[in-house]
Image: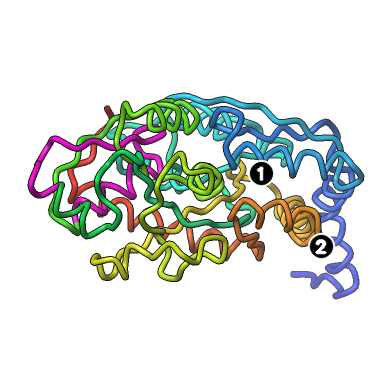
């Protein structure tokens, strides 16, 4: 058997790697599509549009946002899962992405197998708010009322599997209360009905509800993080309000269809990390109560696995279902 000289072997390896290197250098070859599986208006959309704008304004290249709401965000996720894994299609994900893995008995994709994590973009607590006409001002008073009137109180969500839905299901589990779920198609209609007095309460993302609390249209009872929010230090946490151990972090991130070449994945991660460090982006996020994150793709992958396991347990133990 004739031995191949080391120099020749190295040359062969370099030649074999050439297509991947060339493809990474040439990327992108067309506009990058950022799928947002939610309606315009909420932070998921803001994140997608921020990345698209920065890509197009001198970052990685032209990018466009494609809003594909519906079916608890699974329509947009399915579209992304079935896209060519060349880095030209990305998907904005949040808590429902992890919840749906258990909430739906049958999905058109496999949450862990058909996607690859790109980056953890940011996080925010939810804020428990009620209509000001309700004669309660604390979480303890809400629990007492719910126990005195089982099945008579209701709460809004932005849809089954949303962070709003799961935040309340976890709350109900930990407080042994019965509060009826009223799902809406998005935060805007849910908040419209809440402020109109048609529903009683909601756990919603800080950016969505804090302005209404400060404007007196809603009453804030507690935040879902373990520490109080710097934007509303006067509002206690659920944990310190009589539900010890309660914690929900509403996170946002970016994934792509499984199979994106590592060189392209690394470049996408690096470019979005740069975006998340820009002063105007950080100010925009923090003004809305969202803490920019960042970091490696592997870190986000670990977070996704932990969230799938956490919410899978809540779905099974609470009996949560698709309404």
At mark 1, the secondary structure is helix
Circle 1 residue:
47
Q: Which mark is residue 155?
A: none
Tell me what residue is drawn at x 59 percent, y 55 percent: 290
| Separation (CA) of disc 1 from disc 2 | 40 Å
Is label 1 in contact with label 2 (beta carbons under 8 Å)? no
Residue 129 position within the rendered picture, expressed as x and y whole percent measured from the top left: 38, 46
- Image quarter in which the C terminus is found: top left
Circle 2 residue:
13
Task: Work out whether residue 263 can be spotted.
Answer: no
Tell me what residue is drawn at x 33 percent, y 46 percent: 166
256 part of magenta stretch: no
Tell me what residue is drawn at x 30 percent, y 54 percent: 137
- Neighbor class of circle 2 (other Cα within 10 Å; few <14, some 14-19, many 20+) is few
- Image quarter in which the N terminus is found: bottom right
- Front-most of residues 278 and 114: 278
**What is the span of residues highlighted in magenta in the rendered image?**
146-173
């Amino acid at each position: 058997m004739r031995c191949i000289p080391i120099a020749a072997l190295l040359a062969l390896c370099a030649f074999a790697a050439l297509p991947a290197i060339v493809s990474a250098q040439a990327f992108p070859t067309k506009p990058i599509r950022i799928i947002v599986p939610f309606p315009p208006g909420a932070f998921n959309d803001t994140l997608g549009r921020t990345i698209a704008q920065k890509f197009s304004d001198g970052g990685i290249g032209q990018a466009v946002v494609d809003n594909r709401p519906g079916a608890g965000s699974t329509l947009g996720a399915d579209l992304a899962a079935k896209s060519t894994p060349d880095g030209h299609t990305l998907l904005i994900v949040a808590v429902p992405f992890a919840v749906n893995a258990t909430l739906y008995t049958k999905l058109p994709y496999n949450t862990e197998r058909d996607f690859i994590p790109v980056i953890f973009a940011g996080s925010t607590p939810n804020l428990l708010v009620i209509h000001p006409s309700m004669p309660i001002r604390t979480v303890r008073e809400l629990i007492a009322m719910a126990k005195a009137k089982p099945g008579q109180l209701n709460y809004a969500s932005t849809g089954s599997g949303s962070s709003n839905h799961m935040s309340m299901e976890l709350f109900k589990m930990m407080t042994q209360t019965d509060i009826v779920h009223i799902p809406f198609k998005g935060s805007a209609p849910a908040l419209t009905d809440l402020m109109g007095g048609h529903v009683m309460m909601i756990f919603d993302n800080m950016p969505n509800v804090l302005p209404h609390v400060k404007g007196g249209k809603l009453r804030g009872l507690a935040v879902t993080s373990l520490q109080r929010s710097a934007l509303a230090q006067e509002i206690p946490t659920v944990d310190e309000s009589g539900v010890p151990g309660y914690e929900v972090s509403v996170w946002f991130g970016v994934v792509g269809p499984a199979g994106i070449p590592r060189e392209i994945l690394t470049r996408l991660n690096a470019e979005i990390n740069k975006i998340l460090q820009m002063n105007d982006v950080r100010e925009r996020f923090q003004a809305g109560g969202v803490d920019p994150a960042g970091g490696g793709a592997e870190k986000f992958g670990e977070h996704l696995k932990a969230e799938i396991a956490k919410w899978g347990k809540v779905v099974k133990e609470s009996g949560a279902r698709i309404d």
